[in-house]
Image (spheres, rainbow, N blue to C red):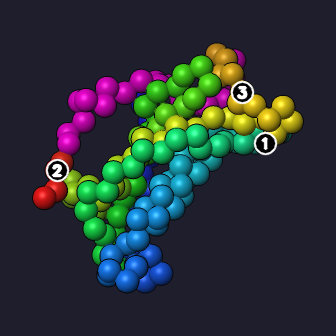
Amino acid sequence: MIKHYTDIRVQGFHIDVNGHVNNARYLEFMETARWEYLQKYFDYAFFEEQGWNFVIVRINIRYKRASLLNEELEVETYIKEIGDRIVTMMQTIRLKGTKLIASRAEVSWVLYDQKSEKSVKLSPDLLKHFKLHDYQVDDASEEQIEVE
């Protein structure tokens, strides 16, 4: 499993009227981190040449802690599972340098063929363009931090 970390500094435009990061912004932070991951560990040019896009099909997100102006956050991203057509990633946003979790999400996506308007089957040959070593993570072994 390859974990990738993306740093985010909370800016004024991330804050809502309640004085903390708006819930929709966490999704944007995670999207930024996923794109960094894809561009670093995938043969992105190959997928573009094929006319394939990465399309989200499901996000299950849990908000655990409010993030505040000027806080440094860290988004951890890794692949949990690769199925026949669906790739599932785990993403966790933490207060940088701590174990305090602000948000955690399971994100599933497919490679979408623009021409056929269908998802692409993830064959072993195709997976070579993912440039990854190990696809399975035992998520139960991760330390869970509950914030009251």
> Which amino acid type is shown beneath numbered disc 3?
Val
Q: Distance from label 1 to label 3 (Cα)?
A: 13 Å
Considering depth in this image, is 3 or 79 the residue closer to the camera?
Answer: 79
Pick the quarter of the image with the C terminus.
bottom left
Specify which label sits upstream in the sequence, 1 or 2. Answer: 1
**Residue of label 2:** 146
Q: Which label belongs to residue 120?
A: 3
Q: What secondary structure is marked by label 1?
A: helix
> Which amino acid type is shown beneath numbered disc 1?
Glu
**Range of the magenta residues?**
125-144
**Residue of label 1:** 48
From this view, report whether residue 7 is shown above or below residue 51: below
Q: Position of residue 141 (x, y in %)?
A: 23, 30
Instruction: Choose mark 1 or mark 2, whichever is in front.
Output: 2
Could one spot residue 21 in this view of the protein? Answer: yes
Specify which label sits upstream in the sequence, 1 or 3. Answer: 1
Q: Distance from label 3 to label 2 (Cα)?
A: 38 Å
Q: Position of residue 23 (x, y in %)?
A: 41, 65
